[in-house]
Amino acid sequence: MSLRRPLARLFMTPVLVWACSLALAANKDLSREKIVDLDHLTEVSPGVHVIEDKDHVVLVPNVTLITGKDAVLVVDTGLGTESARRVLQTAERLAKGKRLYLTTTHFHPEHGFGAHVFKGKATLIYNRAQRDELLKKGPAYRRLFSERLGVAEALKDMRFVLPDIVYEREAEIDLGGRVVRLSHHQPAHTLGDQVVSVPAQGVVILGDLLETKSFPIFPWFPEIEDTDVDPVNWREILQAVERTQPKVVIPGHGPVGTARDLTEAVRHMDTVRDEVTKRCSSGQDLASIQKDLTPLLRAQHPDWELQDWIANEILVYHTRLCGSASELGLFDKVARE
Ligand SMILES: [Zn+2]
């Protein structure tokens, strides 16, 4: 991808950022590179197994399998049929004939677009906001991933399925000697984010509310009419989870972490919020805030992945805190040039 202007990187649309971070080659389907790696299956707490995204492969999530005496709960499916098939086989091996449940941290394709493989074999349980968001936005995300992110093969025989159980704010599943709590808070990374925890063991699964060793993913996609991300709520959820002092923190992407990763993520969000507020109050426009602040944020975490997403993070904070939605026309226009 060639964007000749020195500042063009700062003006890329989120979809372009995603495509660039995938190093998307024309006509190349990347689906085989996006399959969960069962060699990375590890038990991070008694009965809590993670197919870990150790190497931070874009579009490969962490998948968690929680076992009890009576049942096994799978959290997230991986992207498309082949990943989900491998996750289901792993769950069946751990379950040894026990009942299976499936839930997803949020509706995004690499987290939930394998649920069709589980339908009829596991009991699917989602919160209502997530189910509704999947119905509303799912088809557009499928097109986006298939047509622009190079993973059409993974999604070609995927079909949308509905959950068997829907809850509103909170639910508990007793797997037999191990109780798992599912909770839905408020719009943050998506409208239907779900925090999954094993409170007795200090384990929490956050989906894309947290990435370890990485800048956060702000899904701001006006191209497909999805601008629901809310960083203020998001930060509140992370802080509430932080107060529970978890021992094992499982992010959406990146290696399994600890409470320290949560603290770092909250601190980073506070920095961006404060810097954007300060700069827009003093009259700086979005483009110049992105230009000035991006290198400062990179310098704070030079080892963090997904640096291309910083500009979008600033954009979202600016839109929410400084009312810059009118600048989106400019943003999109420059990106298309
Ligand atoms: Zn996501």
Image (spheres, rainbow, N blue to C red):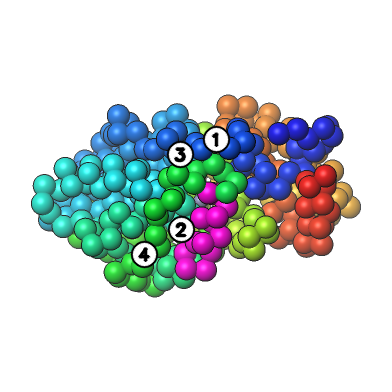
Instruction: List the residue tagged with mark 2.
Output: 107
Does any portion of residue 296 appear in the rendered image? Answer: no
Task: Give the CA distance from mark 3 to mark 1.
Answer: 9 Å
Q: Residue furthest right?
A: 283
* Image-quadrant location for residue 130: bottom left
Task: Give the CA distance from mark 3 to mark 2.
Answer: 19 Å
Q: Main secondary structure of the magenta part?
A: helix
Q: Is mark 2 within 8 Å of ligand 1?
A: no
| Horizontal side, residue 62 vs residue 272: left or right | left
Instruction: List the residue tagged with mark 1.
Output: 28
Residue in the picture at 33% in, 51% down: 75
Residue type at the position of mark 2: Phe
Q: Is mark 3 within 8 Å of ligand 1?
A: no
Instruction: List the residue tagged with mark 4.
Output: 161
Residue type at the position of mark 3: Ser
The C terminus, quarter of image: top right
Looking at the image, is mark 3 or mark 1 nearer the viewer?
1
Looking at the image, is mark 4 or mark 1 nearer the viewer?
1
Looking at the image, is mark 3 or mark 2 nearer the viewer?
3
